[in-house]
Image (cartoon, rainbow, N blue to C red):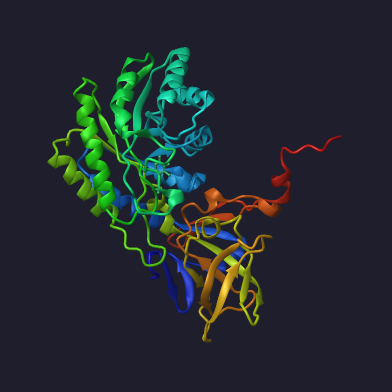
Amino acid sequence: MLPGAPHVAYRDGLLFVEDCELNALAAEFGTPLYVYSQTAMLASLASYQRALAGRDHLICYAMKANSSLAVLQTFARAGCGFDIVSVGELERAIAAGGDTAKVMFSGVGKTRHEMRRALEVGVLCFNVESEAELDVLSQVAVQSGLTAKVSLRVNPDVDPRTHPYISTGLKGNKFGIAHERAVAAYLRAAALPGLEVTGIDFHIGSQITEAAPYLEALDRLLDLVEGVEAHGIALHHIDLGGGLGITYADEQPPSAEALLSALLERIDERGHSHRRILFEPGRSLVGNAGVLVSEVLYLKPSSVKNFCVVDAGMNDLIRPALYQAWMRIAACTLRDEPPVIWDVVGPVCESGDWLGRERPLAVKAGDCVAVLSAGAYGMSLASNYNSRGRAAEVMVSGADARLIRDREQPADLMHGEHLLD
Ligand SMILES: *Cc1c(COP(=O)(O)O)cnc(C)c1O
């Protein structure tokens, strides 16, 4: 077993995801290849479900972490709702068999068109991120003859102590309504036609590895709940967002069960047990379940640096380039040779195109390597830069491996383009 990837392990020197050997999958489906463990996804979900058992709750999988249809289907069948941030994600949730009555619509920049579609299909609730959005949502709801259920995303101004690009609950971030404006915003929401206030929400950031920022944000949220209800506005649900981190290197985030138990204990202590509890986890449900398999194309040793050029690049997995993220890279075949220190780089024409720096690996051209913990913010952030088709994806369950997305071909990439004449 490898750190942070409980369903990825070596057997007799070969790397497996569940009971599927990665070199064999690479030979069958080609590389670069995303491989997911369905068992790992469901095990992560079970950690949330255990803590919430016996309570009125809903887990809305934040699908921007990985929105491939078979992943969504896996969670829909397990009873999850979805946290979405665009109409495109809404259509994906529907296509995967998701229940629209369990869809939470988040995001700072919802368009009228997106609001209308979400109202038509009957989403659970809109997480509204500004007072201006309240006005527009009210207008769209009235025009559609429908009622929009709303919760306000409140910015609790706590520091989640994570990467600045993925912290969202600080005053300087674009997200949510400022804590001190929240009561006024609720009064406005309650007075507007076409809106029905149902809850309150926060989401403080991503890859959070401690419980303390959540508890701090929760306390501030509960203060507000009490403040809002003092004005006669009932809040039926509390949505505690997502953001729980995973192990990439040596991080030791609390388990979902441990974090939620601490949060629920605080909710009970403060007399809020009767409220419905929502969570919007993304990364923690899928991150450790996925690997990106890539073939070593060329070894380029030099006096200054050794480059291991692989066939997956920043267009397939941008986390290292975008966040300077460290992701474990493991050889798919263990060789009985001393490792050499390599910078593992992709084929894209950018010096920022690297997957890992200074990694000890014993590999030869033609070998496969796997980037671990690549199930979240991997495929969903993939692009076609350099006119590279996006990778294929495989879902593994035990010894069963299913192709869940074809590798993109050049014709797919040119679809919808027009020559001048
Ligand atoms: C991204 C996001 C999430 C999920 O974040 P993770 O860190 O992947 O758990 C949840 N809620 C909202 C509103 C988000 O934008």
User: In this view of the protein, can residue 387 be seen by the observer?
Assistant: yes
At x 39% / y 15%, what residue is drawn?
194
Q: Quadrant of the C terminus?
A: top right
Q: Residue furthest right?
A: 421
In the image, residue 298 sits, relative to residue 337, either above or below, namely above
The image quadrant where one finds ligand 1 is top left
For the image shown, how many numbered marks are present on the structure?
0
Please tell me which residue lies in front, 368 or 325: 325
Please tell me which residue lies in front, 395 or 250: 250
Please tell me which residue lies in front, 403 or 181: 181
**Quarter of the image where one finds residue 340:** bottom right
In the image, residue 351 sits, relative to residue 387, either above or below, namely below
Image x and y of residue 362, in percent: 54, 80
Q: Quadrant of the N terminus?
A: bottom left
Image x and y of residue 192, in percent: 36, 15
At x 51% / y 57%, what residue is drawn?
319
In the image, residue 78 sits, relative to residue 11, either above or below, namely above
Please tell me which residue lies in front, 389 or 21: 389
User: In this view of the protein, can residue 332 be seen by the observer?
Assistant: no
Q: Answer with left or right where residue 276 lies relative to residue 112.
A: left
Image x and y of residue 145, in percent: 44, 13
Image x and y of residue 79, in percent: 35, 41
At x 39% / y 50%, what residue is drawn?
206
At x 30% / y 20%, what residue is drawn?
187
